[in-house]
Amino acid sequence: MDGAAARIRRELEGLADPAYREFQARLVPTVDPARIIGVRTPALRSLAKRLARERPDDARAFLDALPHETYDEMNLHGELIGRVAKTPQEAFGLLDAFLPHVDNWATCDLVRVPALGRDLPATLERIRGWVAAEPEYAVRFGIVQLTALFLGNAFDPSQLDLVAGISRPEYYVNMARAWYFSFALVRQPAATLPLFERRPPALDAWTHNKALQKARESRRVTPEQRAYLQSLKV
């Protein structure tokens, strides 16, 4: 570990909260608890903000230090990508280096990269690559970004087919698919409902039913809509 990365590791260790460490260990069962320092999210984000603004050379050195040993360093890395990347192309490069090393849903889902919204066609093309990739959390990241960026004005029905066509056995991939479809049912019902009305179902039964369950839990769904979604369960 080089000087900057070692200094940042010590800073994270200085922010450790033992109680939060135990809480995090329960949330991310795929991570060895020994790899969790226990830094609370506001403190992690504050450190990322300081590094990006006041110590950009240290931030860049840390981003070059993959793979990181601890869960918290990985989370800090994800936070830094969003703060350092100024263009979609820069973000793509940083993410392509990072995602193969991600080993849990929480690190995957905390990454927010504003630069991705500056060229949505290019981002959609990169999402197509991520969801077809081998690493589990690259696939999940692609689905999460499709949910965050493409269920509003940038929505196209072909995106539903993109997620429906993902065939993976991993729980955290399929949970992301279910969340995507649950949001699509609420935000883009005209395009999405036919997918759930189709018989035989277009999706595997677990994802189909989990998406309906999550959509029914939305506050934006009326009692009548909730009853209809329940009727579509397989």
Image (tube, rainbow, N blue to C red):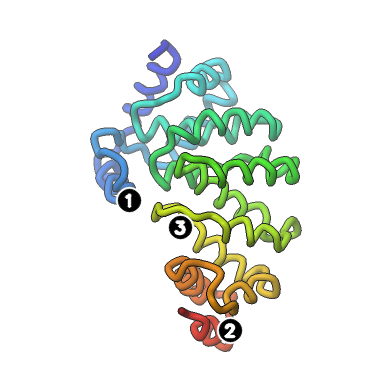
Q: Residue furthest front?
A: 200
Which quadrant would residue 87 be assigned to in this image? top right
Q: Residue 109's spot in the image, x, y percent?
A: 49, 47
Disc 1, SS: helix
Instruction: State the separation of the CA atoms marked 3 and 2.
Output: 24 Å
Q: Residue 9's spot in the image, x, y percent?
A: 37, 23
The answer to whether 110 appears left or right of 220 in the picture is left
Disc marking residue 27: 1
Name the residue: 41% across, 11% down. Answer: 2
Q: Between disc 2 and disc 1, whose residue precedes?
A: 1
Q: Residue furthest top?
A: 3
Q: Is the residue marked by circle 1 packed among few (<14), some (14-19), or many (20+) residues within 10 Å?
A: few
Image quadrant holding the N terminus, namely top left
Q: Is the residue marked by circle 3 packed among few (<14), some (14-19), or many (20+) residues within 10 Å?
A: many
Which quadrant would residue 222 be assigned to in this image? bottom right
In this rendering, the answer to whether 88 lies above or below 217 is above
The residue type indicated by label 1 comes to: Leu
Name the residue: 44% across, 41% down. Answer: 107
In this rendering, the answer to whether 147 lies above or below 57 is below
Q: Between disc 3 and disc 2, whose residue precedes?
A: 3
Q: In this figure, which residue is indicated by the disc labeled 3?
A: 174
Disc 2, SS: helix
229, 84: nearer the viewer? 229
The residue type indicated by label 2 comes to: Gln
Instruction: State the separation of the CA atoms marked 3 and 1.
Output: 18 Å
146, 24: nearer the viewer? 146
Name the residue: 31% across, 44% down. Answer: 30
Q: Residue 28's spot in the image, x, y percent?
A: 33, 47
Disc marking residue 225: 2
Q: Between disc 3 and disc 1, whose residue precedes?
A: 1
Disc 3, SS: helix
